[in-house]
Image (cartoon, rainbow, N blue to C red):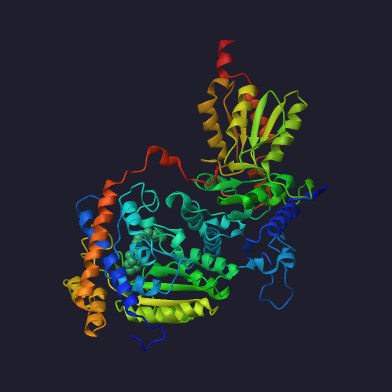
């Protein structure tokens, strides 16, 4: 049975299904139950935006509210994972990663390699990413490239409810540490989602739209901007292929390269800060491995190299728009300087 | 030695002596071989501190977890990690405890409950809270012990973990190995409180301070605290005051220490000498029995070094192995 539900509900459903299936799955985070120790109702919040609401009623003390102490509880989730549990720790806003990153990139990510293959750390760290919530510089970053940079971590960033459910279920079953990035402006976004359990394998991008003229690669919220741009371009008879990466580590290089070899043009859209991000990474990979197929310079669409601004008028300028994506596509279609010279 | 709640029979005492001697011999051998240039990387020696690891670990089994520090060899040996595998690891060999991928600062053996030495100061405290949480969920009575030096005791992770362990009532023991120095910086200067008991009290934990060079003092205090944690009584802090015989790491000229300081410590506060004295003076053990252990330990370490040197290094394919379980 499939019905239209929001990404927030899909995430809640994935957590519920996995907790039913596997008794070693536990959840922890600040206010993920809400009201612990307070005189009012239990289960008061279900997370700061209500993603885990209702799970306490179903799973009781397998949900642990934590003190405000990211280093301690994220580290505890990792330690518990190394001792046979499958914790899903919520970091609320990924921007708080700075407080506890050591536990993730020096501990969880390295145990297996550093200990000669003798450790498994099946932990999921989930949290909100992304701009557009008027939440300003410390609650709006993507930071996805930071996680992707680290060997030993897997990085997931769904663009819709269907993917969020299947990817989160896979993340929980996965035996490596996973950073699960939830774009806060997609929580309300609805798609058809089966009620039953399903897992989406990592490293398999989703081709959302076929096209022969240009390849647009993105992930997370900007996938929707890319689709809007593709629709607008189609009215001008430009057919864009839109690839949603879904997972950033591992990444589906084959789908990207196959597409670029067909279209000869590449636009990469990344909401993360522009230096050393997914856009630069993918551009470099394509330039190195499919240079001969390129008919035009690669275009990157990213925010400017600034913190995320607060004022709505500025934040709207900051986030890559559908118009910016379409303009980048048009740049790849413009005659190259060399052919202009030849003419 | 029998009028305590934690009686030790002769076999236990000889085992304690053997463990401490093994650690000492292991470290002294590394000191010599490092100077010869045989050993790559950073090596932090536990010599002088053996009573602490030994006195605590004698209360633990493989089901109990420990999170160690950069100065982890003693914790490993006392927790039962194979000495040959440790030596091979320090030499960077494929037969090492971590197949040569970790080295001195990352020796681990999860099958023995040893969750790793750690190159990041204070990082073990949150991890051991997780290990204790897992034990609590399983209801298997397992406890977690995290070691920190006086230096690392200033880390937020350590302080946060004491709070978390108290709030969640976890079976965790926070052991402060106070050897007076963090690299070259004195504990008296860098630690704001006079007593770690004050820090423990601040987080609602019982705290105990013992002379960490006195095996019996460590053993008794740890026994009480471990028992309490196992029975659901919650976390506690144990401060062991101890002494470091060598530099912070091998190659440290130790110009920050007072003249004669180390010689004095070696003469008067050598935990192994003190244990041997107690055992022989009370007539529990004959000197010849200890000498026999010494010889066995020497042979063991000699063999570990010989095997490590003869073992093959990892091969090129190992560079890419074990980054992920599956990718
Ligand atoms: C987070 C972090 N900061 C600094 C260091 C460098 N460092 C390694 S050991 C050490 C001093 C540790 O002192 P203490 O905790 O007292 O342990 P001891 O060496 O005395 O056993 C320092 C500063 C580190 N490895 N990790
Ligand atoms: Mg110290």
Q: Residue at x 76, y 32 (%)?
A: A231
Q: Residue at x 23, y 73 (%)?
A: B290
Residue A327: horizontal and vertical position, in percent? 67, 30
Q: Is residue B149 above or below residue A187?
A: below
Residue B3: horizontal and vertical position, in percent? 37, 89
Count of numbered marks = 0
Figure quarter occupied by ligand 1: bottom left
Q: Is residue A168 left or right of residue A116?
A: right
Q: Is residue B117 above or below residue B101?
A: below
Q: Residue at x 47, y 45 (%)?
A: B322
Q: Is residue A337 above or below residue A139?
A: above
Q: Is residue A295 left or right of residue B244?
A: right
Q: Is residue A309 visible?
A: no
Query: Residue B216 is drawn in which quadrant?
Result: bottom left
Residue nearer the viewer, A267 or B91: B91
Residue B270: horizontal and vertical position, in percent? 24, 74
Residue nearer the viewer, B62 or A138: B62
């Amino acid at each position: 049975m499939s019905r239209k539900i929001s990404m927030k509900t899909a995430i809640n459903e994935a957590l519920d299904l996995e907790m039913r299936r596997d008794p070693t799955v536990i959840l922890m985070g600040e206010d993920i139950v809400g009201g612990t120790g307070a005189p009012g109702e239990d289960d008061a919040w279900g997370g700061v935006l209500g993603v885990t609401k209702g799970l306490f009623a179903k799973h009781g003390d397998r949900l642990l509210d934590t003190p405000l102490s990211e280093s301690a509880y994220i580290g505890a989730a990792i330690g518990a994972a190394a001792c046979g549990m499958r914790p899903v720790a919520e970091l609320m806003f990924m921007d708080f990663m700075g407080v506890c990153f050591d536990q993730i990139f020096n501990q969880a990510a390295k145990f297996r390699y550093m200990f000669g293959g003798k450790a498994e750390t099946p932990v999921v760290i989930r949290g909100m990413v992304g701009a557009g919530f008027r939440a300003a510089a410390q609650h709006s970053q993507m930071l996805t490239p930071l996680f992707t940079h680290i060997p030993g971590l897997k990085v997931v960033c769904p663009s819709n409810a269907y993917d969020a459910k299947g990817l989160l279920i896979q993340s929980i079953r996965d035996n490596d540490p996973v950073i699960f990035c939830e774009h806060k402006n997609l929580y309300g976004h609805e798609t058809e989602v089966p009620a039953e359990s399903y897992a989406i394998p990592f490293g398999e991008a989703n081709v959302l739209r076929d096209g022969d003229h240009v390849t647009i690669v993105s992930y997370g919220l900007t996938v929707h901007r890319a689709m809007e741009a593709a629709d607008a371009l189609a009215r001008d008879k430009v057919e864009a292929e839109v690839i949603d990466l879904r997972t950033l580590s591992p990444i589906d290089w084959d789908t990207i390269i196959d597409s670029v070899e067909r279209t000869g043009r590449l636009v990469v859209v990344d909401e993360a800060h522009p230096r050393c991000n997914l856009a630069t990474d993918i551009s470099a990979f394509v330039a190195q491995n499919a240079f001969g197929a390129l008919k035009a310079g690669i275009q990157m669409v990213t925010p400017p190299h600034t913190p995320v601004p607060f004022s709505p008028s500025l934040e709207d300028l900051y986030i890559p728009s559908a118009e910016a994506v379409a303009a980048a596509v048009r740049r790849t279609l413009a005659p190259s300087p060399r052919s202009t010279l030849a003419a | 030695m029998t009028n305590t709640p934690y009686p030790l029979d002769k076999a236990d005492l000889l085992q304690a002596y053997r463990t401490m001697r093994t650690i000492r011999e292991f470290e002294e051998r590394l000191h010599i071989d490092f100077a010869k240039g045989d050993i790559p990387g950073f090596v932090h020696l536990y010599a002088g501190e053996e009573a602490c690891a030994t006195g605590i670990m004698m209360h633990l089994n493989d089901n109990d977890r420990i999170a160690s520090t950069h100065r982890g060899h003693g914790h490993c040996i006392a927790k039962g990690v194979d000495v040959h595998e440790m030596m091979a690891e320090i030499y960077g060999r494929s037969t090492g405890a971590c197949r040569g991928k970790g080295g001195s600062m990352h020796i681990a053996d999860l099958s023995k409950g040893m969750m790793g030495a750690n190159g990041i100061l204070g990082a073990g405290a949150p991890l051991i809270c997780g290990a204790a949480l897992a034990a609590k969920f399983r209801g298997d009575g397992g406890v977690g012990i995290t070691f920190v030096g006086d230096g690392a005791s200033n880390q937020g992770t350590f302080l946060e973990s004491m709070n978390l362990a108290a709030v969640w009532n976890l079976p965790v023991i926070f052991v402060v190995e106070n050897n007076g120095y963090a690299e070259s910086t004195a504990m008296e200067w860098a630690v704001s409180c006079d007593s770690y008991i004050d820090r423990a009290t601040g987080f609602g934990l019982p705290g105990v301070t013992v002379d960490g060079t006195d095996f019996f003092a460590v053993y008794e205090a740890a026994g009480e605290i471990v028992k309490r944690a196992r029975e659901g009584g919650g976390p506690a802090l144990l401060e062991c005051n101890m002494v470091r015989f060598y530099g912070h790491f091998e190659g440290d000229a130790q110009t920050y220490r007072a003249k004669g300081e180390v010689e004095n410590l070696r003469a008067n506060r050598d935990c192994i000498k003190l244990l041997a004295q107690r055992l022989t003076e009370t007539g529990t053990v004959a000197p010849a029995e200890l000498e026999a252990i010494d010889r066995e330990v020497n042979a063991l370490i000699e063999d570990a070094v010989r095997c490590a040197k003869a073992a093959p290094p990892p091969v090129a394919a190992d560079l890419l192995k074990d980054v992920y379980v599956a990718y």
